[in-house]
Every structure is written in C-alpha cells, then in structure tokens.
Image (cartoon, rainbow, N blue to C red):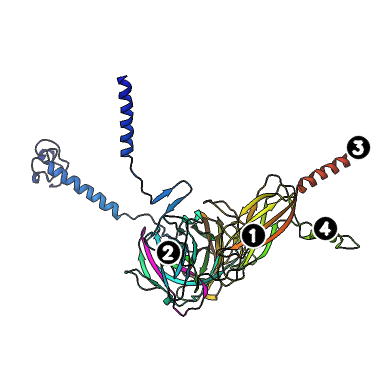
Amino acid sequence: MKTNKLTRYGTLLFLLFFLSVTPVSAVDRMESDSYTLRFTNLNMTSGSKESGNFKILDTVGQFAPGEYSSSGYYVKAGFPYIKTIIAFAFTISDLSIDFGSLPLSTLSTQTNTLSVSSGGAGGYSVTAQQNHSLKLQTSPTTIPDTTCNTSCDETTADIWTSTGKYGFGYNMQGNDIPIAFIDSTYFKQFANISTAETPQIVMSSINVGTNRTATVTYQANISGSQAAGDYENQITYTAIPGY
Amino acid sequence: MKNSINPQKTPGVGTSFTPGVESLKPRWFGTLRPRWLRTFRYLVRNLVILTLFLLLPTPAHAQTTSLSIWPPLLQATIQPGKAITQVYRLKNLGDDTTITTALKSFTPSDELGHVKLLGSELSPSFFSFQNADIDSFPTTFPLKAGQTQELVLKIKIPANQPEADHYLTLLFESNTTGLIGGTGTTNQATIGSNILLTISNDGQPLKSAKIEEFKVEGSELPVPRTRDDPRRMSRLVPNLSKIGLLDSFSPISFLLRVKNTGTTLFKAIGQIEITNTFKKTVATLPLREDNILAGSIRSLTSEVKEVHTSEVDGISWSPTFPIGLYSATATITPQDSTNTITSTITFLVLPYKALLFIFLIFVLFRLTKRKK
C-alpha cells in the first residue's frame, strides 16, 4: 500500500517537474518540412492594413489572420497564398566568363548557373541583355553575335555546331528555360542594348519554386582574320517576380 | 678548418650537429634546453609555418552574386495627398557588393503575370527611402556578404494626382562584376520587387471583367459534313462545332483567359464547376487568385495550396476514366465587387484512341483470317 502511494506521488512529482521545466517556445517562428512562416516588420508596415487614407496588402503574414474593415474599406488579411512565405532570390554562380585566348575555328565554351527561388503568386522571369557585342577595349572591332549554323538571332535559336560559323552566343539547359533551346546544340544571340534590342527571357515560370536552376553555356568562335586582342562585354541578368 | 667536422671539439654530453660553432654554445644547448627556450622555438616554428601558409596562393574563388528581396509584391490603394511606408529586406547571400536602386514602370509582357520593364512613369519625388543612413531615392549603398539591409520606402501621392493605377518595379542592381584576363564576358545581376499602386479617392474603384476565352485544350470534334450540305450535321446538333472531343485516357486541361475591362487591377476570384451527362456536379476546380492589371488579359491557373517544384501550368482536371458529355462553367468575380461573369462550355470525353486501336486489331484479324 505504501509502495503504491509512493509510486503515485512520485509519478505526480515527476510530471509536475517535467511540466515546469518545459520551455515556453516563442511564437515568432513556425515551420515544417514544407513551409516556414516568417513574421517580419510587425511593428512597421508589412501585412495588410488600412486606415481612412489608405489600404495596403503585402504578402507577409500577420499576428491575427482574418478580416477586418474600417472607414468603408474592406481588406482580406492573413495568408492568401502559403507560397508567398518564400522570399524572392536570384543567384549567379560565377560572374567571370573567361575564354582566355580563343583558338581559331574552334567552338570554345564556358558555363555558369542561374538559380531562382520564387514565392510570389505569379512566378518569375529572368531576362538577359548585353551592353554590346564582344569588343576590343581600344577599338570598335567586335566578335559578331552568332548566326548559328544557318540562322539565329536574339529571339530564335538554331543549331550551332559548325566550326566554320563564327561569333558569340549562348545556350540554356535546366529548369524553366525557353522551349527554343531544344537541346545543348541550340544557341541564340544575347539581346544587344546598344542596338535597341529588347531584353529576352532566359528563365520563366508561373509557378512557385525553390532553387530553380539553369546552366548558361557561352560559346565563341573566331576566324583567322579576327584582329588579335582581348574582347569583352557585360551581360546583365534581371530577375523579377510575377504579379 | 673552422667549418670542418672535428669530433674532438664536440662539447659536453649529448650530440651537436653543427660542427664548428660548438664553442659558442652553452653547455645546455642540445637535449638539456630550458623549458622557456623550447616553448619559444615551438612558437617561432609554428608562426613561420602559419606565415608561409598564409602567403601561399589561394585557389581561385568564383565571384558570385546572390540577392534576396522581401516582399516580392506590394499592393497598395492610396488616396491623393496621403502617404504610406513599406519595409523591404534585401539580403546579400553572395560576395561583398554595392547596390544601386531604381524604379521603373512595367506592363504585362504576356498573359502569365510576367513583367516588361519600361521607363519610369511617376515622378521620383513620389518615392523616397526613410533610412537615416541611406540617401534619398535613387541611391547606392554597400552591402557586405551575408548582410541584410532594411529599406523603408515611402510612397507619397500629391493631393492633385488623378485616380489611376501605376505598376512599378523597384530594382536593386548589384554592381559587382566579374574579372577576366583574356577574351570573355562579365555578368551582373539585378533583382526586382513589384509595386501595384492604385490611386483612388474612395478606395472602391469600379472593377469589371470579361471572359475573353474559355475552352478545353486538345483536339476538337471535327464537324461532320455532307456533300449536299456541309452544315447539315451542325444544324441537326446545335453548337456541335463548339464541342471539344477528348480522350478518356488523356489529361484534361482548360484555357481560361480573363480580360480586365476596368481602369483598376483586381484579383480574380472564381472556380470552374464541371457537371456530367446527368447534370450532376463531379468536380469544382478552384482558381488561383491572380492579379489582372487594368486593360490586360490573364490566363488563369489552378490554385496551388503548398510549395512545390513540379511543373503545373494552366487548369487541369484528372478524373478517373471520364466518359460522356460534360459541361464546365467558369465563374469569375473581381475581388471586392459583385460583377460576376460566367461562361459555359461542353465537351465529349470518349476512349476513342483505345476504340480505334481495338477496331484496327479487329480489321487486321479479319483480313488475316480471310487470306487463310
């Protein structure tokens, strides 16, 4: 009988001790394998809010998801899309595409990767543009943009495997790339801003996604008549979420 | 002779391996060194090794740019004469860089929610940063690797500004570029965040929409024609030419294009309801609440409830072996309005590919049998 009482009180004391030492977890971070809720700028202006003068809806959560109205306005608050918890992120793996000394009549290639994480409701797009064709620093001499084996430009791709075709172009392989790049032999020109060409989409999606990655292959080939020197240009990738 | 080996001159106990200078060393030089000297030599040796290691050429490190921005989208309705502020969080996940900000207007580049940047349309005086350490907009500031910069953007609308929508992208351009030694190209990254701004006096601008196109994607039923009257069959079965024919074993997807016929953007709230031959509702497909900008068309997609990486485009329905005549009704209501619009289509689902295959097998079987 005594043993039973001791066991009972012991168990009770153990439970009380266990409950008393269990830490109270903060409610500022919630996550699972599939999502993380981030509460940002709660004392500032994020989340949905309104007054008599304005109403504003951004895509971050609030302390108390729900609806409220004031001064004749009506706003939905909370988490209309769970996907919007992902920040929009863009990465270029290597900013230097260095061909070194280009051999004659040989297709030289270099690669880097583009990665995008998009939580916006409307997906994303990445555009590319070059400031000018590959050009000598000291003279206007250029390595022209490729025309591929037969014909290609900044909007249409074509196979470029011939060492007798000279120029500079790129191929995309991976996630969310334009369908024009059927395989790794298809190339395009970069849109040239100096000739008022429109920047072209190199990656795009209408879906939510994390670490969507594509490899850019830069290809150059010069003829024996190409003037000696170091040819350079700059390519700008612009990543913008959808709306 | 001084530097020659002369074992007879080796002093004391132990062994000296430096012939010729032994006479200059104290007797304890060798194994009987004091502890402080051994520690000193140990430290000097390690310092030399460390210095040499630091001076060795390090392997080439590819220069990267990695930026993240929050929030990716800001939607605001503001009265003329009023102002709002919004905090942006820009994080540098790559190498040290400097950031230049810019603000440009955009228009839809397609019907899928992607943007096409234009020149800035609003006066830059509408926008300013409220940070104490960052100049007025536009501005350039350093951003070290791993650093997060909070930027407080203020949007102040002048009192005389007319009611209108403005669609803009706040751009953050990383000024880090690569270094090349020969022929090559350097890359530069720019990241953006969209702002959907509605200037409205009463906060309730008129929202109206129109279903531009609603259809099942895939093959359509060929309209049967006769030599006498090509349209005879169409007369017998009204709207026959509008009926889509789909295979029971193929995925069924819908194309729903909605046009914003008003002067302000709205979120399209709606669904597609599918009924079978007996008018019984067999499926309800909720639609993603996409923004449709004023005057533009957007192809709507299925609602996505959680983060995923699969390719899901458009609106798809995956029933188990559908067969018969179905109707699909799309219902769209612009958010915060009662202007509901609907459109209904009819489509026939049959296992016609399988039936065709069975028919061909049957014909081949009969032909083979006849030859025998």
> Measuring 46% from the left and 80% from the top, which residue is drawn there?
B160
**Which mark, by number, is residue B31?**
none
- Please say if B76 is above or below B49: below
Closest to the observer, A34 or A23: A23
- Please say if B73 is above or below B281: below
Q: Which residue is mark 3?
A: B372
Q: Locate residue A10, reporting x and y percent.
A: 31, 28
Residues behind callouts 4 and 2 on a single chain: yes
Q: Earlier in the sequence, mark 1 or mark 4?
A: 4
Q: Is residue B362 left or right of residue B219?
A: right
Q: Which residue is mark 1?
A: B331
Q: Earlier in the sequence, mark 4 or mark 2?
A: 2
Say which chain tag 2 marks: B
Question: Is B259 a magenta residue?
Answer: no
Closer to the eye: label 3 or 1? 1
Q: Which residue is mark 2?
A: B178
Q: Which residue is mark 4?
A: B237
> Measuring 79% from the left and 45% from the top, which residue is drawn there?
B355
